[in-house]
Image (spheres, rainbow, N blue to C red):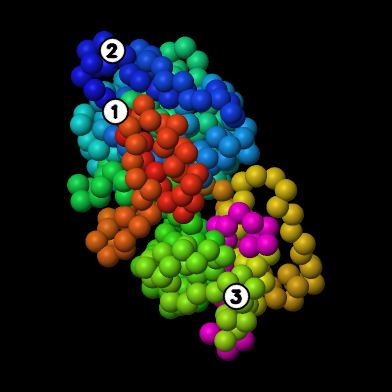
């Protein structure tokens, strides 16, 4: 936040009003954090694929809203009864650099009590809510953000840059959730279908967790090259994946298949690539219409586990931050950077992001 806006007690936000309309740069009064809330000065937000879906009109969000949920910032103020510790139990102070879960959940409802906090009946998602007077700062593309009660906060280690840390709270945590749901990763043969930001992070995390073989599958030669730098041991085009896996596994197939592509064909490919008794996690599709044809006989005889995954739980954000900290020097995360833009240039940032699938473009207030 710059000195000018702070002295005026105003902060800038990029308001999204709907598909085809330019972002509106507006200043709003900086709110006092209410009960259980924190005020955070945003340092960096990255543009996620779902922000792009909304911008392109492929997905509808209530508007006007402040998009952006992959956010890093510094604590500016605590409201009454706001949490003073992060998810690890480490104390929180004004000035601490943090990231936080994409969603806040109540902890009390059926889904919260049954391990699905991302499906909370009272869910609040950053970057997904219509703004209202006095409630503007709920997304990443602004100078500040109000954290609501039920948000999982993680203090960031100094060694982790804003650019590398920001995608932790969506892409990398979703990958952590996918691998948590997959069963034993150590020693496993894992097929990763779709090598965008999620896919290559999945490759790196699977290797970090001791996977024996990680096969990268994508239609893009460029993304396959990045997958190699992120630790993939083998590479396949979609049509060749099943045969390659059979060669690598004495005809069995992958122990675990992870789908992050968003194409129905990739979800079908993930299921086909999985060995008898294996697990396929389907995580890439968040818009309707990706219809799958499944032969129930195949499902029965191959005893497959097929799991859908949407977002993640707070423990996955901790896993993501720990993983990024441990691998910041060994995995070339800079390969995923699509550069950074000032908040006032948010139109340019979104245009650049759409031209760079597989990269993260940052918006710096
Ligand atoms: Zn996201
Ligand atoms: Zn709940």
Looking at this view, is 118 or 199 the one in front? 199
How many angstroms separate mark 1 from mark 3 (CA)?
46 Å
Residue 107, position as x, y percentages in the image: 49, 36
Query: Which residue is label 1 attached to?
Result: 41
> Where does the magenta region start and end?
248-267
Q: Is residue 103 visible?
A: no
Query: Which residue is label 3 attached to?
Result: 241
Query: Which residue is label 2 attached to?
Result: 9
Mark 3 vs 2, N-terminal side: 2
Q: Are marks 1 and 3 in contact (CB under 8 Å)?
A: no
In the rendered image, residue 259 lying in the magenta stretch gets the answer yes
The quarter of the picture where the N terminus appears is top left
In the rendered image, residue 127 lying in the magenta stretch gets the answer no
Q: Secondary structure at mark 2?
A: loop
Mark 1 vs 3, N-terminal side: 1
Q: Are marks 1 and 2 in contact (CB under 8 Å)?
A: no
Q: Residue at x 52, y 40 (%)?
A: 52
Q: Nearer the viewer, mark 1 or mark 3?
A: 3
């Amino acid at each position: 936040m710059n000195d000018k806006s702070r002295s005026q007690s105003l902060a800038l936000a990029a308001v999204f009003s709907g598909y085809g309309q330019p972002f509106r740069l507006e200043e709003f009064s900086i709110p006092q954090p209410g009960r259980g809330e924190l005020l955070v000065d945003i340092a960096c937000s990255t543009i996620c694929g779902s922000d792009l879906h909304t911008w392109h009109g492929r997905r509808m969000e209530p508007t006007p809203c402040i998009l952006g949920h992959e956010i890093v910032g510094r604590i500016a103020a605590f409201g009454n009864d706001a949490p003073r510790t992060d998810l690890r139990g480490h104390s929180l102070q004004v000035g601490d650099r943090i990231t936080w879960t994409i969603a806040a959940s109540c902890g009390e409802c059926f889904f919260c009590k049954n391990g699905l906090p991302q499906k909370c009946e009272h869910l609040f998602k950053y970057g997904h809510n219509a703004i209202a007077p006095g409630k503007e700062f709920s997304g990443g593309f602004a100078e500040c953000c109000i954290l609501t009660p039920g948000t999982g906060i993680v203090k960031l280690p100094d060694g982790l840059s804003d650019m590398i840390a920001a995608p932790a709270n969506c892409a990398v945590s979703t990958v952590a959730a996918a691998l948590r749901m997959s069963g034993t990763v150590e020693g496993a043969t894992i097929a990763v279908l779709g090598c965008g930001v999620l896919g290559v992070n999945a490759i790196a995390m699977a290797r970090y967790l001791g996977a024996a073989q990680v096969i990268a599958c994508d239609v893009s030669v460029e993304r396959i090259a990045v997958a190699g730098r992120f630790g993939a041991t083998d590479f396949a085009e979609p049509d060749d994946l099943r045969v390659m896996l059979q060669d690598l596994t004495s005809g069995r197939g992958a122990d675990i298949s992870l789908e992050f592509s968003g194409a129905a064909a990739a979800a079908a490919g993930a299921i086909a690539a999985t060995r008898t008794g294996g697990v396929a996690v389907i995580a890439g599709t968040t818009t309707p219409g990706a219809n799958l044809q499944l032969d129930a006989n195949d499902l029965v005889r191959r005893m497959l586990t097929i799991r859908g995954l949407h977002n993640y739980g707070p423990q996955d954000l901790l896993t993501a931050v720990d993983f990024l900290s441990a691998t910041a020097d060994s995995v070339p995360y800079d390969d995923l950077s699509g550069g950074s833009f000032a908040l006032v240039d948010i139109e340019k940032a979104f245009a650049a992001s759409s031209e760079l699938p597989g990269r993260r473009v940052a918006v710096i207030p």
